[in-house]
Amino acid sequence: MTETTTTLIATHSGTFHADDVFGVGILMGVFPSHRLIRTRKQELIDTADFVVDVGGVWDAAKGRFDHHQRGFDGARPATEVEGALVPGVGYASAGLVWSAFGTAYVQAWCKGQGHALDEAAVAEVVRSIDHSLVQYLDIVDTGQGDVSPGIFGLSSLIAQLNTHWLEEKGLDHAAKAQLLETRFREAIAITRKFLDHVISKKVAQLRAMDTVRQAPRLLGGRVLHLQEGGMPWTHVVLNEMPEVMFVIYPDSDGDQYQIKTVPVEAGSFTARMDLPKSWAGLRDGELAAVNGVLDSVFCHLNLFIGGARSFEGAVKMAELALADVAAA
């Protein structure tokens, strides 16, 4: 297919789910010149360039992405956990389309945003999106789990966009079908906007990694100084900087410097080192009276973040926190 060719994408009519919405949305992003049909008529399905969640065939080379047929056993590769092989999550249509066209979608997104990522970086974005999002759409759609971690709640959100009996009351078949298609397209728009934002965050993380690695380290290497606020640093610090206890960076409002503890692992509320207990919940003058840093702004009650008006003040807070632990 050339760029000027109109790509025909088919999926089933009637109630939609997140996996068919997602799969069709990916193909729409990869093939901007497209036409969509929602049908269960095999003679129409057979004319499509790509078929999602209907048709009874899985053959990526032929553009067929269904998972309902007898004998279907498509699944992600097994992984080893504590010496035992754990089967990979089975595919629904979302995962089938992403496995075939995730790379092309990410590349198209990067091109549109002016980001230049090498092949390895694109592959990492595709892997990350599958791990954090797509597999949970598949889990819900195939009944592999009723409650899953991650952001699988997108499945429930998409399901709410289906029409209900009161909306359909008094409508003939054609009007119902048109209303459902309108909702389906709304669901695609929501899903793609969400997906694009997830991709954007992952790309930002990858592009920040070298900046984080090259950032100055203070106080014997135990404090990392980032000159830009909002930069994702957790992955690099957790995996490559075991000696770093605190990270200092300018607040997004530009009126203070924050000092943040480093968690023991991603998502954990337990830190490698807390700020001093005597600072908990104090602000401004009360905090300054306790720690002696005149431009202290705050220390969170749970001791994972604090701030000062100046960079020097934040560094002094880090120095005091390190000394507090050493003296304990």
Image (cartoon, rainbow, N blue to C red):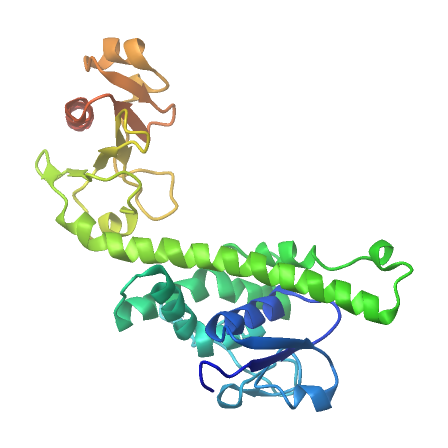
Residue 146 lies, in percent from the top left, at 63, 59
Q: Nearer the viewer, residue 258 or 44?
A: 44
Task: Please say if 212 is above or below 37.
Answer: above
Task: Please say if 310 is above or below 222.
Answer: above
Q: Nearer the viewer, residue 191 or 234?
A: 191
Q: Quadrant of residue 248?
A: top left
Task: Please say if 308 is above or below 177.
Answer: above
Viewer can see residue 144: no
Residue 9 lies, in percent from the top left, at 60, 79
Q: Is residue 222 left or right of residue 301?
A: left
Q: What residue occupies the far right of the structure in this picture? A: 170
Q: What residue occupies the far left of the structure in this picture? A: 220
Residue 28 lies, in percent from the top left, at 53, 71
Task: Please say if 224 is above or below 88.
Answer: above
Residue 252 lies, in percent from the top left, at 32, 33
Viewer can see residue 253: yes
Q: Is residue 222 left or right of residue 106?
A: left
Q: What residue occupies the far front of the structure in this picture? A: 4
Q: Is residue 158 left or right of residue 302?
A: right
